[in-house]
Amino acid sequence: MGFHKDFMWGTATAAYQIEGAWNEDGRGASVWDVCGRDRNVVLFNETGDVTCDHYHRYKEDVALMKELGMKCYRFSISWSRILPEGTGAVNQKGLQFYSDLVDELKANGIEPLVSLFHWDYPYALYQKGGWMNPESSEWFLEYTKVVVDALSDRVSCWITMNEPQCFIGCGHTIGSHAPFVKLGTRDLITMSHNVLLSHGKAVRYIREHAKTKAEISFAPIAPVYIPKDDSKEAIEEARAKTFHMNRERFVFSLTWWSDPVILGKYPEEAYELFGEDMPVYSEEEMKLISQPLDFYGMNVYYSEADHETEGYPENMWQGRGRTGMGWVVSPEVMYWSPKFIYERYGLPIMITENGMAGMDWIHMDGKVHDPYRIDFLHRYLLEFKRAAEEGIPLKGYMHWSLMDNFEWACGYNMRFGLIYVDYQSQQRIIKDSGYWFRDVVQTNGENL
Ligand code: IFM
């Protein structure tokens, strides 16, 4: 037994990272357009102004997905392309772009998965306090309505938020992502609660109003620890670390977001750490936040032990291979993440992102050879298959990323794609790993 016959294989991207056309056809500014510019916060002061120019080249990109035999495509919507001020007037041209993209995907037999929010927060709303504003979940609901009303006749799979740990953690805690601010604990707690309420309001709206039967989740990162050996004690130690929160990095933790969303309560540890600073909410509010989801979307890149400040006594990560981002190559995380998370939350698992950054270039034969990415993927997918064989319900796998793109504060230096993008000419070249992944999809993982 391997992956079930309807397993969803695909690739993922995000609007700001690939679209470009940052000020065309009425698009409003996002925090990345404004705060990411001219402040030496992004490597070489690069921006997403043009990036892969996907806004103009989406047909070519969909054709490449088809050539790769992809069954699904996960992409995000730029909130400020649809609602330039974040709320209020709808930009029909922006909406049309996504409607055309969905049509193009469908015409090519590719199932669209829509992420409502992947970090490009409307700047106009940020000026009003952003996620701190008590109205922020209503703003998100308003935006959700516009998207769902326009696309849900053809889209049935929805992700509300991508990696809340990162847009709150990197964006507002350590200040390495837009809007590049560092706030205190109490503010972070308030923002988190508003993000959770936004998620809940979006889920309710989609469930009640989508024109086709909806499947809904969110896509947090899965900071999972892997056991140092096969013993029961080591497994329990890894599990305990995975579901533990610490004061400094609490917004990066798994339970901070997933316990309210799925178990309907904040973790006990949060009350021990923050006491009276914890949000006061009604039973109704928590019911809204914790409406049933159809699967658990998780973005998995490496084992969390790498960031464990105390470290294991015998450092199991010493000298291990690392990707371009410096992330440790730890394939076992593709077994332990689904296992631990399924055991705690009981939902089928979809890997909504997984992949690696390399320093790819065009070789003298005109092709892009990336044997390390093939090896990386092969190892990770074998571990994922092990989870399938153990009977953990697995729904799909979305590779990050379809193509090289703007890697946030790392600019264009990190290449995550199965397709190489030459940013000067906008030429696309399928990498060796893209063809390799095509064979995995074609055989439904039998060839692994
Ligand atoms: O590029 C990002 C993506 O936007 C969110 N998840 C991690 C990826 C690689 O850093």
Image (cartoon, rainbow, N blue to C red):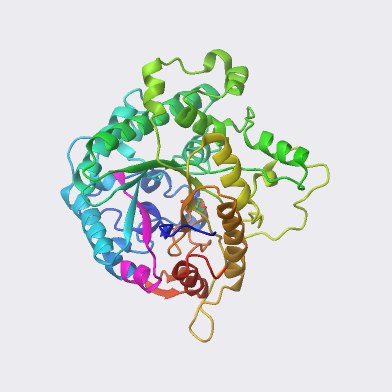
Q: Which residue sits furthest bottom? A: 365
**As drawn, 438 above or below 11:** below
- 385 is higher (above) or lower (below) than 424: above
Is residue 310 one of those drawn in magenta? no
In front here: 128 or 102?
102
Q: Which x, y percent locates residue 202?
A: 32, 34
x and y percentages locating residue 441 in the rendered image: 46, 67
Horizontal side of 334 relative to 42 (left or right) equals: right
* Quadrant containing the C terminus in the rendered view: bottom right
Residue 160 seen in this snapshot: no
| Farthest-out residue, top | 276
Residue lying furthest front: 1
Residue 236 percent coordinates (x, y): 71, 36
| Depth order, front residue of 139/263 | 263
Q: Residue at x 38, y 61 (%)?
A: 51
Instruction: Identify the residue at image location x=32%, y=66%.
Output: 62
The quarter holding residue 72 reads bottom left
User: Which residue sits at x=41%, y=49%?
Assistant: 37
For the record, the magenta segment spans 62-79
Seen at 25% across and 49% down, the residue is 27
| Residue 362 drawn at (x, y percent) | 51, 78
Quarter that holds the N terminus: bottom right
Closer to the camera in the image, 189 or 222 = 222
Residue 27 in sight in this render: yes
